[in-house]
Amino acid sequence: MNHRKKIYSGLVFLVAVASILGGMIAHAKDDSLKVVFLDVGQGDAILIEQGEKQILIDGGPSGKRLMEELGKYVPFWDRKIDVVIATHPDSDHISGLVDVLKNYEVGEMIKTDAKSGTDVDKSLLGLVSDKKIESQLAEKGLAVKLSDEARLDIIAPRADENVSGEKDTNSGSVVAMLIYGKNKFLFMGDFPIEKDPELIADNQDLGAQFLKVSHHGSKNATSEEFLKAVKPETAIISVGKGNRYGHPAQEALERLKNAGSEILRTDERGDVVFECQDSKRECAVN
């Protein structure tokens, strides 16, 4: 009887190992692109994944919640995130990144030189230093390559901007464009409305089908002029249910509706997941 149990246990173990190896091989060969606007409450966290490569933009206000969210999309055997981008040092964007740096091997950290002076900002900077994580300054012209067909371009701030001198950390937010064939995703961080004209003037083509709306749909973000330049078919708002700021503001929602954008909100849908099967077809929300 014991002999049979040992044989059965051995077979179960071999099947489990084979399943894991099969999953690893299939995951590595998968060339499709996934863009996930993670439901992290009142904050931002965006996972871009293609095969075994991942880019994480911001980490939301809670490390525990972010780790739970990542666990839904990053296989348990994959303990590396290739690139982490901190758009600006506000706690609702970087608190979760502290846990990411503690629990994952991070290949590269991209951030501005803005500092908030908060404990969480100091902790994040300390981990980057202690773990000797390669760090790059986020500035216009920097590109992150996922594959031959997918890249993420940093389009703000400019290299000549004194982001570290800004009292309002939102003013120095990283703005980035993901390009995958015909598909374009524009990620706005908490970029403020008063800087929209500057961004429009700096970038000849801001057109993108998919827009991550700035500052959780605040009334002080995403101007009509900006929306005319981008012409987003779909606008994604990362926002916490019943938040104390009243986000998203009715004024911002009206601007998006007038621009003809479909609005998807994490407080209503949970995670907003876009599947991009190949670069020749438009990405579709799952």
Image (cartoon, rainbow, N blue to C red):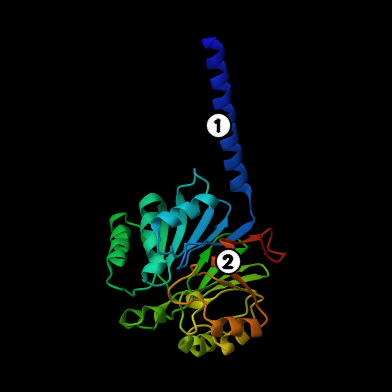
Number of marks present in the image shown: 2
82 left or right, relative to 129? right
129 left or right, relative to 262? left
Name which quarter of the figure residue 161 lies in. bottom left
Q: Which of 139 and 84 is in front in this view?
A: 84
Secondary element under disc 1, as helix, strand or loop, is helix
Q: Quadrant of the C terminus?
A: bottom right
281 left or right, relative to 272? right
Q: Name the residue under label 2.
A: 268
Q: Position of residue 225 (x, y in %)?
A: 58, 89
Secondary element under disc 2, as helix, strand or loop, is helix
Q: In which quarter of the image is the N terminus?
A: top right
Marks 2 and 1 in Cβ contact (< 8 Å): no
Q: Residues within 10 Å of mark 1 (few under 14, many from 20)?
A: few
Q: Mark 1 points at which residue?
A: 17
As drawn, 75 above or below 281: above
